[in-house]
Image: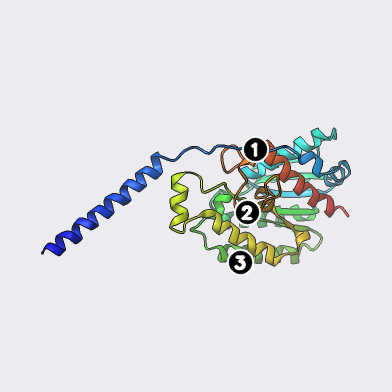
């Protein structure tokens, strides 16, 4: 009888402890604090590369981090004193005409639903866009790949979709983007998730490793590698805090740095 009472007492204590940890994770979770990082993006790309990139017609499907990157594109052309590239913006499933040279900037699907994003990307290209563009790229968001995601399944679906598109549209150069990262662990909640095996960045890095192992370097836009490289060259497994103001999206410094890496890929496609 006494042993049963002790067992019930310990069980109650454990349950109470779990509740307290949960409450603490929700209410004692300090806000992310950004770090300063030098804005050197303009020095990493030449005016000639920017001019070549602007001559390529690109279909770029993305969500919020993609919007950050597009802001970085604008900042780089301004910094170099060059005319802005043609940009045609479109909402989900909206039909637009591609410019001759420039970017079709498309919001795709809903965050957290990578299958829908893939289907929307595929549909947009097959609706006629593939005949008008030189380069096409779908960028998943960090919320599309989390600890809950079956990483191998999603990558397998991505690969089969892109394989079919490349077969049907051989004149299009498809770039394969790694998934953006977040800083972290940041705050008590993130630390608890990491301890119990629910670190979202671990899943993102697994997905990104599959991208790097599957496609040649010239077909990869390694967004995560840019995000996770500190100004001193140190390589992290997370987003470098100096490239973000909220721990997830890119600030102007991070936006321009990532945009420079992407525009270099577009410029290379012009050759």
Residue 232 location, x and y as percent? 70, 46
Residue 212 location, x and y as percent? 69, 62
Question: Is residue 178 visible in the rendered structure shown here?
Answer: yes
Count of numbered circles in the view: 3
Q: Quadrant of residue 258?
A: top right
Residues under numbered marks 2 and 3 in contact, where contact means CB atoms less than 8 Å apart: no
Q: CA distance from mark 1 to mark 3?
A: 32 Å
User: What residue is shown at x 47% (from left), y 56% (from top)?
Assistant: 198
Residue 242 location, x and y as percent? 63, 40
Q: Residues within 10 Å of mark 2 (few under 14, many from 20)?
A: many
Residue 251 numbered tag: 1
Residue 16, above or below 37? below
- Element class at badge 3: helix
| Identity of the residue furthest to the left in this view | 1
Residue 179 numbered tag: 2
Dot in front, 2 or 3: 2
Question: Is residue 96 visible in the rendered structure shown here?
Answer: no
Decide which of 172, 63 is in the foreground and name it: 63
Residue 156 numbered tag: 3
């Amino acid at each position: 009888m006494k042993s049963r009472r002790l067992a019930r007492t310990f069980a109650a204590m454990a349950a109470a402890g779990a509740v307290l940890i949960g409450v603490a994770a929700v209410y004692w979770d300090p806000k992310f604090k950004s770090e300063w990082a030098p804005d050197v993006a303009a020095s990493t790309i030449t005016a000639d590369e920017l001019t070549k990139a602007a001559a390529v017609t690109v279909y770029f499907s993305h969500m919020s981090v993609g919007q950050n990157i597009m802001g970085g594109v604008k900042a780089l052309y301004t910094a170099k004193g060059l005319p802005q590239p043609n940009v045609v913006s479109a909402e989900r499933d909206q039909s637009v005409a591609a410019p001759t040279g420039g970017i079709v900037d498309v919001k795709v699907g809903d965050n957290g639903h990578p299958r829908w994003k893939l289907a929307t990307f595929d549909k947009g290209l097959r609706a006629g866009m593939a005949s008008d563009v030189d380069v096409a790229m779908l960028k998943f968001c960090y919320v599309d790949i989390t600890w809950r995601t079956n990483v191998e399944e999603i990558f397998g679906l991505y690969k089969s979709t892109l394989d079919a598109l490349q077969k049907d549209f051989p004149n299009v150069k498809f770039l394969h983007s790694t998934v953006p990262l977040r800083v972290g662990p940041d705050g008590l909640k993130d630390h608890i998730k990491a301890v119990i095996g629910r670190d979202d960045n671990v899943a993102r890095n697994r997905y990104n490793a599959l991208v790097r192992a599957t496609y040649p370097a010239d077909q990869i836009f390694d967004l995560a590698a840019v995000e996770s490289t500190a100004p001193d060259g140190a390589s992290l497994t997370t987003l470098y805090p100096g490239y973000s103001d909220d721990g997830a999206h890119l600030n102007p410094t991070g936006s321009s740095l990532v945009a420079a890496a992407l525009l270099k890929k577009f410029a290379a496609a012009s050759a």
